[in-house]
Amino acid sequence: MKKRILFRADGNSSVGLGHLYRLFALVEMVKDIYDFGFLTHFSSTTSVIPNTYAVIKIPKGITIEDEPKWLAENYNPEQYIIIADGYQFGSSYQQQLKAHGFSLVYIDDLEKEHMYADVVVNHSPLAKEKNYKSEKYTKFALGTDYAILRPSFLEAIKKNRVINKIDSVFICFGGADPYDLSLKAALACLNVKEIKKVNVVLGGAYKHDQVFKLAKENVKLNIYQNLNEKELISLMISCNLAIVPASTILYEICAVKMPVLSGYFVENQKRLYDALNKKKVIFGLDNLVKFKKDDFIREINHILNRSNFNEIINNQNTLFDSKIKERYLDLLKFVKYRNIKKSDIKLLYDWANDKLSRANSYNPNPISWEEHKEWFAKKIKDKDSIIYIAEINKTPAGYIRFDVKQKESVISILVSAQHRGKGLSGKFIKEASLKYFENCDLPIIAYIKSKNIASVKAFEKANYIKIKETIVNNSESYIYRLKKDE
């Protein structure tokens, strides 16, 4: 059964549009692979949602407390992954969704709630797993490796840029801009003679009107609304200075690369601001709530007095890499582990005789069907042999075996040929080991040929520690170990 995704976020002039826009970026990363729907509250500003999305409005009478039950009644938890972005989706909401059997990805930036989600994403450079309270099964996708960026900006990451002068400014303060910082920044730019063009992008929830009057009086000032992704990045590329808050738009500016004045006007922007200011990829303005026109003029002139802007751009170049989309696609490969059953006999036989599997084994000889039948019959009855089949969206993708000894258990792993090269070995080892420790306290030992670099990396990724070098069946080998709660 093919998994589908329900994206869940709200946004309007009261709460802003940031949560919606972050999910739009994730939609664009996965929409060619997954069927999806976009779930939002009836009070959301749906006009900003792309018209190609299937929008589903939460009915008026459904409260946030009722919502998990409503979702389970209307969407099969076995079939749907939920990706939620918003502070209302806290511990209780997550716990209820998991109780109904949903796979859940939660986009966070506060590090406050106890997490029940399967995966927690926080793309702040300062995000640390140790700052979270969570369930044992919860995985974390943290830092700029998981920056939430739309496809055009993922492409922009790959391109270098050199800026020698500043004369065109990009200004954007999000969906609602409650303090009308767009107007203040625009007024400041119009008062700096070196600035020849001022481009202000307004969000769908913007309610002020003075900036429109200002644009009628100044040919240097251009106002833009409802720009699509391509139009937005094209406008950014035409500019050589940006003034934006520490929100998703700042990551987009850093992907395009240019000098940028940034600060924060709501609490959830402060951590990202602190992180990027520390990395010297922005010119920091701190708290923008009380910022006035003259404050912006002072800071713009400070930048103009610099002779070289490329230190900032070089730092922006190191912020992201080109594998963000692939990482998100891997996150959505929810793996379930089940015990082997009699019908798996042929599956394990085919896997075991795969050419690479035999080459990596300490016994490289092909296995006959009779040998395999005898081995399988013993293993399936052996209480000291634990074998999990790893399934991705109900498709078998490999197995992990634990042979329990007196003082330790020995692990073996195999990833099917069609699932190799996707970084799954470390994931299988880590998750299956956690499942093993639910019922057994003995440490786990892995024997790995020293020339099998991929396997070494996979076990290290799963937090196994090398404890010894040895010879096994005439092959130079390493012994790796994992203890419970390590």
Image (cartoon, grey):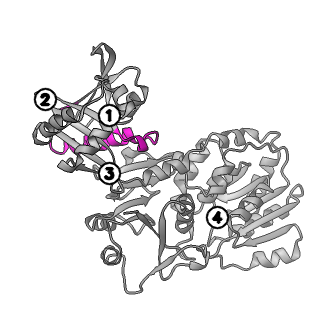
- Disc 1 secondary structure class: loop
Residue visible at 17% across and 48% down?
A: 342
Pick the residue in front: 4 or 180: 4
Q: Nearer the viewer, mark 1 or mark 4?
A: 1
Give the CA separation, mark 3 to mark 4. Answer: 54 Å
Residue 473 visible in the displayed image? yes
Query: Which element is circle 2 on?
Result: loop
Q: Which residue is mark 1?
A: 353
Viewer-nearest of labels 3 and 2? Answer: 3
Q: Which mark is residue 405?
A: 2
Q: Residue at x 42, y 30 (%)?
A: 454
- Which element is circle 3 on? strand
| Magenta residue span | 415-444
The relative height of residue 180 versus residue 284 in the rendered view (above or below) is below
Residue 454 vs residue 83, the one in the foreground:
454
Which quadrant of the view contains residue 316?
A: top right
Q: State how far apart marks 3 and 2 are (Cα).
A: 27 Å
Does the residue at mark 3 contact the one at mark 1 (Cβ under 8 Å)? no
- Find residue 391 and name its label: 3
